[in-house]
Image (cartoon, helix red, strand yellow):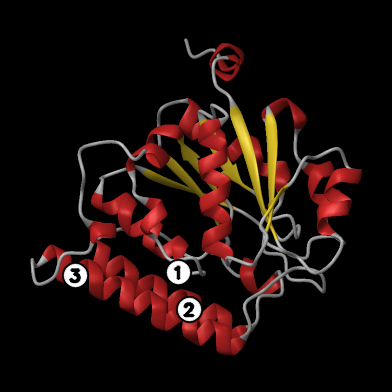
């Protein structure tokens, strides 16, 4: 019989918080993280101009601080590298702007602990109408759905959403995929999913609520257009690599583990 307590005790779970201007929301985020499900919290501040670093220290964290802004993908690279260095068996990314609900950490990591999945994504699209009720702008809902259809068609996956930032990864995943080769901007997340496909990792989704509010960070329209174009470029690189037209080091399967 599967023993949750025994399995949980054998795995180190680290939450990584890629932070940028999270001074106003960090405390709420930390308060909602279930302490019995997270062994360590790593906050990486991406050169925030506000008081995020001071607030993190006030709350008992020892933040890693980038001297200059590297971008969302660059922040995640630091997060995952440091989590692996500290011995994480499972790494869960939680945005410190409180847009995603940390209370759901157990549901996110359980499929990995049970061996049912290598990666778990929180999806805002699994609950019908949930994104609209949570305040996601109409143009984001349309873009999210359209890009998801395209990405599924190209990658042969059946995900309900590719663009959520609430994600949990097994150590094996992060040691295998060459995430350091990915973009430093928001396209990092899509490139990582392509790498999961290339390396045949198992992806599970769970439904999560949508939260759009004043202090939550969100990609604006112009940045969203750039993000969409970046996704198209990444898919093009994947297709070219699969057809042996051009070889992308990001999307070529490697046998040796990432170091």
Residue drawn at x 38%, y 75% as measured from the top left: 231
Q: 36 above or below 174?
A: above
Q: CA distance from mark 3 to mark 1?
A: 16 Å
Q: Disc 2 designates what residue?
A: 227
Q: Disc 1 designates what residue?
A: 187
Residue drawn at x 63%, y 83% as measured from the top left: 220
The image position of residue 163, as x and y in percent, is: 50, 65
Farthest right residue in view: 58
Graded by Cα atoms within 10 Å as few (under 14), some (14 to 19) or many (20 or more), the crowding at tag 3 reads: some
Closer to us: 91 or 3: 91
Report whether 196 appears left or right of 135. left
Residue drawn at x 22%, y 64% as measured from the top left: 248
Q: Secondary structure at mark 3?
A: helix
Image quadrant assignment for residue 12? top right
Say which quadrant the C terminus sits in.
top left
Image quadrant assignment for residue 230? bottom left
Q: CA distance from mark 2 to mark 3?
A: 18 Å
């Amino acid at each position: 019989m599967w023993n949750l307590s025994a399995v949980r005790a054998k795995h180190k779970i680290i939450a990584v918080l890629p932070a940028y201007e999270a001074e106003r929301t960090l405390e709420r985020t930390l308060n909602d993280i279930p302490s019995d499900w997270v062994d360590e919290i790593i906050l990486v501040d991406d050169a925030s101009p506000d008081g995020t670093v001071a607030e993190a220290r006030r709350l008992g964290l020892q933040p890693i601080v980038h001297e200059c802004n590297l971008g969302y993908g660059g922040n995640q690279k630091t997060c995952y590298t440091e989590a692996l260095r500290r011995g994480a068996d499972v790494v869960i990314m939680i945005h410190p702007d409180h847009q995603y609900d940390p209370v759901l950490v157990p549901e996110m990591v359980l499929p990995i602990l049970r061996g049912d999945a290598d990666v778990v994504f929180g999806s805002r699209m699994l609950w019908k109408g949930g994104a609209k009720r949570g305040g996601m702008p109409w143009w984001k809902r349309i873009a999210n759905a359209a890009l998801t259809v395209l990405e599924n068609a190209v990658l042969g996956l059946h995900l309900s959403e590719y663009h959520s930032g609430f994600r949990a990864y097994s150590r094996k995943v992060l040691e295998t995929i060459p995430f350091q080769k990915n973009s430093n901007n928001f396209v990092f997340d899509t490139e990582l999913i392509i790498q999961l496909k290339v390396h045949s990792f198992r992806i599970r989704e769970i439904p999560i609520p949508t939260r759009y509010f004043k202090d939550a960070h969100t990609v604006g329209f112009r940045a969203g257009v750039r993000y969409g174009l970046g996704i198209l470029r990444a898919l093009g690189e994947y297709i070219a690599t699969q057809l042996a037209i051009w070889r992308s080091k990001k999307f070529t399967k490697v046998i040796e583990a990432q170091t």
